[in-house]
Structure formats: structure tokens, C-alpha cells
Image (tube, rainbow, N blue to C red):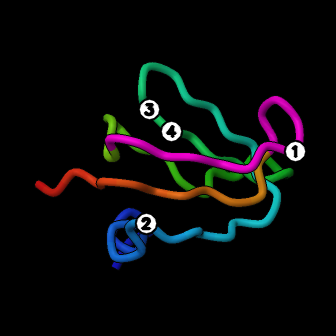
């Protein structure tokens, strides 16, 4: 099971990621850790909505996934 599937199962719940850098460009999410390793990257908008707790502009410590799109 990949990370996307896990987030789909956790729909509507907070997913604690530790401190990660979040980039959202045109609905494509990219989460990277301090070393620049990709934690999560979506090719297209996998979720209709998400919320995150921002520590700084791009630094988040959790993300809440709402209404994941199912293929």
C-alpha cells in the first residue's frame, strides 16, 4: 500500500508527517523532508481539499486530507 492509499484510508483525519516542506502548485502536492527527500508527491490533484498546520510559509507538521478522489 503506498502513501496515497494510506491517506485515502485516513480521509478526514490528521496525518502527522513531522516537519515537512509543502509545495502546492496547481493542486499538485509535493512534500519533502529537510534532506530534500520526497515524502509525498501527487502527479495530479488526488484530493479535492486538504488543510495543514503551517509553522512557516512552506513548513507544515500535519496535513488533513478531505474528500480524496478515487480512481
Residue beneath disc 3 = 28
- Badge 3 marks a residue whose secondary structure is strand
Q: Are marks 4 and 3 in contact (CB under 8 Å)?
A: yes
In the figure, residue 62 lies in which quadrant? bottom right
The answer to if 6 sits in the magenta stretch is: no
Residue at image coords 34%, 76%: 9
Q: CA distance from mark 2 to mark 1?
A: 21 Å
Write down the region rendered in magenta. Answer: 48-59
Residue beneath disc 2 = 12
Residue beneath disc 4 = 29
- Badge 4 marks a residue whose secondary structure is strand
Residue beneath disc 1 = 55
* Front tag of 2 and 1: 2
Q: Nearer the viewer, residue 3 or 10?
A: 10
The C terminus appears in which quarter of the rendering? Answer: bottom left
> Is 26 displayed left or right of 1 in the figure?
right
Amino acid at each position: 500500500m503506498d502513501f496515497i492509499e494510506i491517506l485515502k484510508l485516513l480521509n478526514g483525519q490528521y496525518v502527522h508527517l513531522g516537519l515537512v516542506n509543502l509545495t502546492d502548485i496547481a493542486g499538485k502536492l509535493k512534500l519533502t523532508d529537510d534532506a530534500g527527500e520526497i515524502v509525498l508527491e501527487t502527479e495530479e490533484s488526488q484530493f479535492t481539499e486538504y488543510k495543514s498546520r503551517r509553522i512557516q510559509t512552506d513548513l507544515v507538521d500535519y496535513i488533513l486530507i478531505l474528500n480524496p478522489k478515487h480512481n
